[in-house]
Image (cartoon, rainbow, N blue to C red):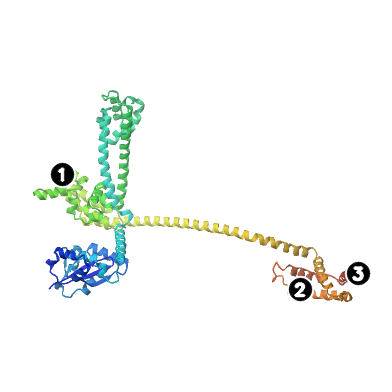
Amino acid sequence: MVLLHVLFEHAVGYALLALKEVEEISLLLPQVEECVLNLGKFHNIVRLVAFCPFSSSQVALENANAVSEGVVHEDLRLLLETHLPSKKKKVLLGVGDPKIGAAIQEELGYNCQTGGVIAEILRGVRLHFHNLVKGLTDLSACKAQLGLGHSYSRAKVKFNVNRVDNMIIQSISLLDQLDKDINTFSMRVREWYGYHFPELVKIINDNATYCRLAQFIGNRRELNEEKLEKLEELTMDAAKAKAILDASRSSMGMDISAIDLINIESFSSRVVSLSEYRQSLHTYLRSKMSQVAPSLSALIGEAVGARLIAHAGSLTNLAKYPASTVQILGAEKALFRALKTRGNTPKYGLIFHSTFIGRAAAKNKGRISRYLANKCSIASRIDCFSEVPTSVFGEKLREQVEERLSFYETGEIPRKNLDVMKEAMVQAEEAAAEITRKLEKQEKKRLKKEKKRLAAIALASPENSSSTLEECEETSERPKKKKKQKPQEAPQENGMEDPSVSSKPKKKKSFPKEELVSDLEETAGSGSLTKRKKSFPKEEPDSDPEESGNKRVPKKKRKFSSKEEPLSSGPEEAAASKNISSKKKKKLRKLSQEN
């Protein structure tokens, strides 16, 4: 009995489920298909064997990329080898994707099946997966799917910006559409303006030039010799300008009103602007092709190379095509018609627009198209998978096609492909080294500019911060300075002018306190004064100017007086003491009289 297992890939991890012994024919009945929607009945059919969760979102993305490319990841290999039976012939593994099924069958040897019953079972597993796995909720499963979907799509889109071929596909499609529209609008201008000036159609063949002339001439009766120089500038030919002037004088066209001329001029101006935009778009396409596919554009031209990329879908798809597919790319309708009617298959498709096939003889067109398709497939692979894109290989391949074309005409033997590729490799290495040097220089310049910009920002920010700090400091220091100035000025003036003056106010302040204590000071006389003078120097050394701040002003006064007291002589001290004692006596007498 063959055991049927089902592999289910989810954003959370891989799940391996076993199908209970049920007849395959009965599973396809509509009643059984309806039972898939019921969880209880679905549990009777399917049971979970193993579940391998992904450790991180990066691992989930790697596994998703591997499954989409048809590659067996190590996590999937470990799961299958661990939980599937060892007898591989008795195991049938059901998978949803045929690519991964073929890879598993090739690498691990298990028989794989897709479609039919497997699709119905996977539908039920997808519906009830959060109930089959313990600890998994429907909300967390939806979040995991959303996160993996975003990361997977971001990884698919995230390529080198300068080598994105989507812009080439859009620009070549727009270029072809513009060519059609410009031709249609130009024919409308020719027909519309031809009623008034029919001879101009035969003289001027280019559509854009015709629209410019219709916009410039307007009414043909106003055309004169003064406008001849402008006509020569527009037509780039003096003979054609003279012919237009002569034809305007003898034209068979009908007269036209001013309103009709205004409409014709406005429409022709739109056509001229479209043709100018078409030229700018062509230059943009050339620049993009030189960045994305330089070898292919050097071999067959920008327009044909861009059409090949657009028809294949991308440069990677074109690189995967064989040369036989590249040869008939764009002629699928003719190919299938020939296969249906058993006629001759087409010899060339889009590469017919290349100049090589037009230059070849009729009998050699098939040969040169086959050879050119071979070289185009080589050039597309070089452009797709090379790290530094260069046009060296495309130029060498073009030389080979030229030599083969001359060989068909003259019989001259061309060079061997090996010799040409060796030369191309040497030149490509030199070109790649030069390109890398240029890129390094550009990167250095960019880094220097970035450093200068950051340095300027860093310089600007400290200046602003320092200015704000200085303003704050000034505002905080201003009131302090005003308070300090008054006590600082007093000791300087007292100290510098006269030290004896500074000592007098001290004694005046202290004496009234001592006089009110007792009347013993009358008898003490000058003896008490000498004792006080002796006590001053003892107290003065305690007040050190270095230790004391600006606030302790009276100690500074003591310092100045103490330094200068030894300079005073004995008689001066005696005179000062007599004056003080006389003043004291007078005060005491007044107090006694009042009492």
Q: What residue type is labelled 1?
A: Ala
Residue 90 location (% of width, % of height): 14, 73
Q: Label 3 belongs to which residue?
A: 593
Q: Which residue lies furthest to the left in this view?
A: 342
| 29 is higher (above) or lower (below) than 216 | below
Q: Label 3 vs label 2: CA separation?
A: 39 Å
Q: Distance between the residues labelled 3 and 1?
A: 154 Å
Circle 3 — which element? helix
Q: Is mark 2 on a helix, strand or loop?
A: helix
Question: Could you say where residue 325 lies in the image, as x and y percent from the top left?
Answer: 18, 53
Q: Looking at the figure, which quarter contains the N terminus? A: bottom left
Indicate which disc, 3 or 2, sits on the residue closer to the N terminus: 2
**Seen in the image, is 149 located left or right of residue 29?**
right
Q: What residue type is labelled 3?
A: Gln
* Residue named by callout 1: 361
| Residue 476 can be seen in this image | yes
**Toward the viewer: 185 or 459?**
185
Nearer the observer: mark 3 or 2; the answer is 3
Find numbered disc 1 in the image and state the secondary structure of the residue it sits on.
loop
Q: Nearer the viewer, residue 413 or 51?
A: 51
> How far across and how far down the image is residue 495, in percent?
77, 65
Q: Is residue 468 left or right of residue 58?
A: right
The residue at 17%/75% (across/down) is 86
Gap between marks 2 and 1 measured at Cα: 125 Å
Instruction: Categorize mark 3 by other alpha carbons within 10 Å: few (<14), some (14-19), many (20+).
Output: few
Where is residue 339 shown, x and y percent of the image? Answer: 11, 50
Per the image, the residue denoted by label 2 is 540
Q: Quadrant location of the C terminus?
A: bottom right
Report which quarter residue 219 is drawn in. top left
Sequence order check, earlier mark of 2 and 1: 1
